[in-house]
């Protein structure tokens, strides 16, 4: 029996305990999603860029949903037809529908581009992560390697690598990816140097946590923001580089409808059939500009946060 019970007069009922108020629901994530949606809708250029990238991704995944034409077979009677309702992008010298070839070629070009970006992201981020965190002689070695890669124009470096490796889409992807390693390494190193001086990283080190755990738990997650924005920018650059190498004949051999090969195949008919090079080239330009616009939006979002 407590002191409050002894001091309470008889007949007086103790007041019921008031239940603790329920915690408000976490609305942070829906609010952030709604804020992101409003951010996109207020910027028609960004909305158009996202729509272009989604459309091209849909071409690569389900090309049959966008065209019923055969990208490899042609009708000789329809050769070199200009753009019309039956053939949106016209036909080539063999009577093949150019729009169908562009749509089906999206999977080839984007698959090679994605592999190139993955090579640059993984190798460059790993080098930058080790150089920024370990410092010392590791930073010196990685820094000299990055300087050498940056001293050579990326397209020339890709040409030299693919000449040594041989032709093919995978080798094109490796060559283009190695050309972008230096950019990813520099960005990741700068972010790791910034994060490594944070209080929580110093506290993790002082608590006896081993350096691989500090690297994986604290440094890497907080350094990946600008690198992800660079992925979108490098995607557009990689599309351009892959198309350029395909234009020169280093990619998938004909009759595969790779975008660069389509532009290359139509250059002999530029005076009489302008659509063979112009329309596939405009698709490449649209994808590159859309990727750059999305990259700028991601970079600005990261700076605001």
Image (cartoon, helix red, strand yellow):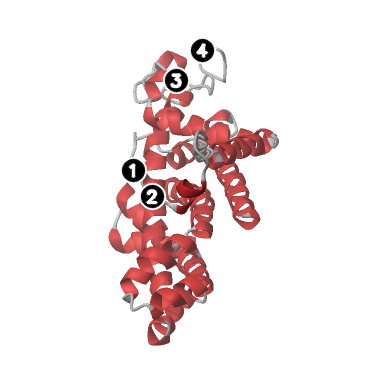
Tell me if residue 43 comes above or below residue 76 in the rendering: below
Is disc 3 placed on a helix, strand or loop? loop
Q: Position of residue 275 (x, y in %)?
A: 57, 29
1 or 2: mark nearer the eye: 2
Tag 3 and tag 2, C-beta contact below 8 Å: no
Tell me if residue 117 comes above or below residue 151 in the rendering: above
The answer to which of 304 and 110 lies nearer the viewer is 304
Q: Earlier in the sequence, mark 1 or mark 3?
A: 3
Q: Earlier in the sequence, mark 3 or mark 4?
A: 3
CA–CA distance between discs 3 and 2?
81 Å
Res. 261 mark: none
**Dot 4 corresponds to which residue?**
86
**Dot 3 corresponds to which residue?**
66
CA–CA distance between discs 3 and 4?
13 Å
At label 1, counting other C-alpha atoms closer than 10 Å, the crowd grade (few under 14, some 14-19, many 20 or more) is many
Res. 252 mark: 1
The answer to which of 304 and 242 lies nearer the viewer is 304
Q: Residue furthest bottom?
A: 137
Tell me if residue 219 comes above or below residue 50 in the rendering: below
3 or 4: mark nearer the eye: 3
Q: Earlier in the sequence, mark 3 or mark 2?
A: 2
Is disc 1 placed on a helix, strand or loop? loop
CA–CA distance between discs 4 and 1?
28 Å
Is disc 4 placed on a helix, strand or loop? loop
Residue 99 visible, this angle: yes
Res. 1 mark: 2
């Amino acid at each position: 029996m407590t002191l409050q019970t002894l001091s309470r007069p008889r007949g007086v009922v103790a007041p019921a305990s008031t239940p603790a108020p329920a915690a408000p629901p976490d609305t942070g994530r829906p609010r952030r999603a709604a804020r992101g949606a409003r951010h996109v809708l207020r910027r028609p250029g960004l909305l158009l860029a996202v729509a272009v990238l989604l459309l091209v991704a849909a071409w690569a995944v389900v090309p049959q949903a966008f065209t019923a034409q055969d990208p490899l077979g042609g009708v000789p009677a329809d050769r070199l037809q200009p753009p019309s309702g039956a053939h949106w992008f016209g036909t080539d010298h063999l009577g093949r529908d150019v729009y169908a070839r562009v749509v089906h070629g999206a999977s080839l070009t984007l698959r090679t581009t994605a592999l190139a970006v993955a090579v640059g992201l993984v190798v460059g981020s790993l080098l930058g992560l080790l150089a920024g965190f370990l410092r010392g002689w590791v930073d010196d070695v990685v820094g000299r390697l990055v300087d050498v890669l940056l001293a050579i124009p990326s397209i020339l470096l890709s040409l030299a690598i693919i000449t040594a490796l041989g032709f093919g889409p995978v080798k094109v992807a490796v060559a283009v990816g190695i050309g972008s390693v230096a950019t990813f390494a520099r960005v990741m190193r700068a972010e790791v140097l910034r994060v490594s001086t944070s209080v929580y990283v110093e506290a993790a080190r002082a608590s006896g946590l081993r350096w691989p755990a500090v690297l994986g738990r604290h440094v890497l997650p907080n350094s990946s923001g600008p690198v992800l924005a660079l992925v979108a920018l490098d995607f557009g650059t990689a599309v351009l580089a892959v198309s350029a190498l395909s234009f020169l004949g280093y990619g998938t051999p004909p009759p595969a409808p790779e975008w660069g090969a389509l532009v290359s195949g139509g250059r002999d008919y530029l005076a009489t059939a302008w659509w063979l090079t112009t329309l596939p080239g405009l698709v490449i330009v649209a994808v590159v500009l859309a990727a750059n616009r999305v990259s700028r939006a991601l970079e600005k979002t990261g700076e605001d946060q």
